[in-house]
Every structure is written in structure tokens, then in C-alpha cells.
Amino acid sequence: MIAPVEVFEAETHQVERTWLPTCRTPERLWNVYTDIEAAKRRMVESAFEAARADLRALGITFGLPVTQFNRHVAAILGQMPLVQEMDAASRLPEGVTASTGAALIEAASLGSILPYPSTDMWEVLQAWLLYFFPERYRREPATEIFRQGRIIG
């Protein structure tokens, strides 16, 4: 079980039950939060819009320092039933495979239309969990397969 992150009452915010992050680069949320114009110039438009949508969904009060911002996001993620299910599944010997993660996301979406395929949504959520809970989770690389390449000449 994810240990609750201590936050002030004013920082708590309930996201919609079926909300899932859409920004594939959670490390860029801070840039969008602190300097929207600079972030807009430095990011691909779709990534920028996804970050803005995620920040709106999270309802983060403007003006937090980076540590408080990260704690706030972690607190919201930790309260999500889907994340709690992922956390429990990650403790099993097999961990959470891509297919398991996608299936849990499909079940949690309650029939709502996902912005990306469930396997992509799993990759995004996984990136967020790795970023906002760096001491808690790790991603194990897939088995590498050694193959002969193409011979030129």
C-alpha cells in the first residue's frame, strides 16, 4: 500500500475517478506549471496540451515550490484506486506486465473512452509512477534478444 504523502488540507484535490495522466513526460509538468510561455516554445504542441490538461485535472494551486508541487502530485496519484491496484499488483512476484497494466486501466476507465490505447496509457501512468515515486518503483528491462544483423557488402 502506498504510504500517504503528508500534505496540507488546502493542497488536497479530488480528481475525477476515471482521470488518467496523458502527458508522456511527467518531468515537464513543472516547466508548464512555472512558465507556461517558455514551456510552450520548448515542447511539441501535443505534449504541451497534454501537460496543461493534466495540470487542470490535478487542480494544483499556483505558486508552490517544486518539492511541494511533486508532493501534491504524488498525494493525488496515491489516492487513486487504480494506482492502489497497480501498487498491489507490483508487489506480486510477476509484477505488472504491459498486458496486466493495460487490463487494469481498461477496467478502471469504467467504459469511458481513453485518449490513447490502454497499452499507451499504461506507459504514461508507469512514467508518472516512476517519476513521482522514484524510491518505490523500478522498471525491469525486457529480456534482450541477440540476433544477427544484416550483412552489407
Image: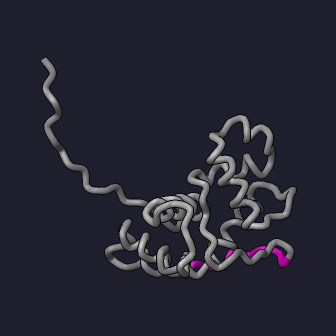
Q: Residue at x 50, y 77 (%)?
A: 87
On screen, residue 85 above or below 68: below
Q: Residue at x 43, y 71 (%)?
A: 101
- The foreground one among 135 and 33 is 33
Residue farthest toward the top in the current orientation of the protein: 153
Residue 43 visible, this orientation: yes
Residue 2 at x, y = what percent?
57, 78
Specify start and end residues of the magenta stretch as a single range.
Answer: 1-9
Q: Position of residue 151 (x, y in %)?
A: 13, 26
Name the image quarter holding residue 83. bottom right
What colour scheme governs how the chains and residues are painted in the rendered image of this protein?
one colour
- Determine whether, in the image, residue 57 is placed left or right of residue 46: right
Look at 66% across and 68% down and name the residue there. 74
Q: Is residue 77 left or right of residue 30?
A: left
**Residue 4 inside the magenta-drawn segment:** yes
Asked if residue 134 can be seen in this view, the reply is: no
Magenta segment, principal secondary structure? loop
Residue displayed at 38% across by 73% down: 100
Label tally: 0
Q: Is 57 displayed left or right of 101 in the figure? A: right
Q: Is residue 91 above or below residue 41?
A: below
Q: Up-down: is 92 above or below 28?
A: below
